[in-house]
Image: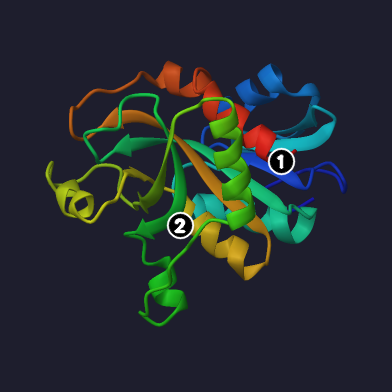
Amino acid sequence: MSLHINAQPGAVAENVLLPGDPLRAKWIAETYLEDPVRYNNVRGMLGYTGTYRGQRVSVQGTGMGIPSTLIYCHELITQYGAKKLIRVGSAGAYQPHLQLRDIVIAMAASTTSGINAARFSNADYAPTADFDLFLKAANYAQRHHIPITAGNVLSADSFYSDSEIAYQKWAEYGILCVEMEAAGLYTIAAKHNVQALAILTISDSLVTRQETTSEERENTFGTMVEIALNTFQ
């Protein structure tokens, strides 16, 4: 057992899905996995392991933001042997062509977090997706006629901004959407030489001000989960 995950040795699979919301982790496990077994409930951050098409898969809630996500990713990688980690989360659109429930795959993740500035002495580190996982996800989506958009996303430290138009500078430079975890995931995966990818569903738009409900974000974003699970195959 680790400090934040009370799983027994061998209870966590090498393939791990990472939703921020622990209730989404529960929904994913109960909806998609065969014979799911809960291995973690510390701090209510639920984790499950089951199988999908014969492949052993775990799903672990991470909470919101890079600091929380890094705690769980560090323990999953260093103490439980996770090798392929795919974030499945929600994001806010920065571009007008992105609509609610569109799928975005993060090729790279810019960030407002200071975590890498501290690590690299204020130099700019560019957190990027694992190419093999990215290619498998994109190819699966193409084969199954699932529209995706791929590119650079923003991992922000603040959910609420002081300015309603602050996003526009990022949008001018091609940032597709904002979320809160991918840059941290890509960085820790690179450090430990494991594979990572973030697949996101647009839950709201800073352009149109449309948004989904918390219940919809918890249990209706199945397309990105389908892509992620089949990326492990």
Coloring basis for residues = rainbow
Q: Does residue 215 show up? A: yes
Q: In the rendering, which numbered label is found on residue 183?
A: 2
Q: Is residue 31 left or right of residue 213?
A: right
- Secondary structure beneath label 2: helix
- Secondary structure beneath label 1: loop
Front-lying residue, 87 or 226: 226
* Residue 54 in picture, x, y percent from top left: 85, 30
For marks 2 and 1, the one nearer the N-term is: 2
Q: For residue 25, what is the image quadrant? A: top right
* Residue 27 in picture, x, y percent from top left: 61, 21
Q: Does residue 46 show up? A: no
Distance Cα–Cα, label 2 vs label 1 = 21 Å
Q: Is residue 107 left or right of residue 3?
A: left
- Amino acid type indicated by mark 1: Phe
- Amino acid type indicated by mark 2: Ala
Q: In the rendering, which numbered label is found on residue 177?
A: none
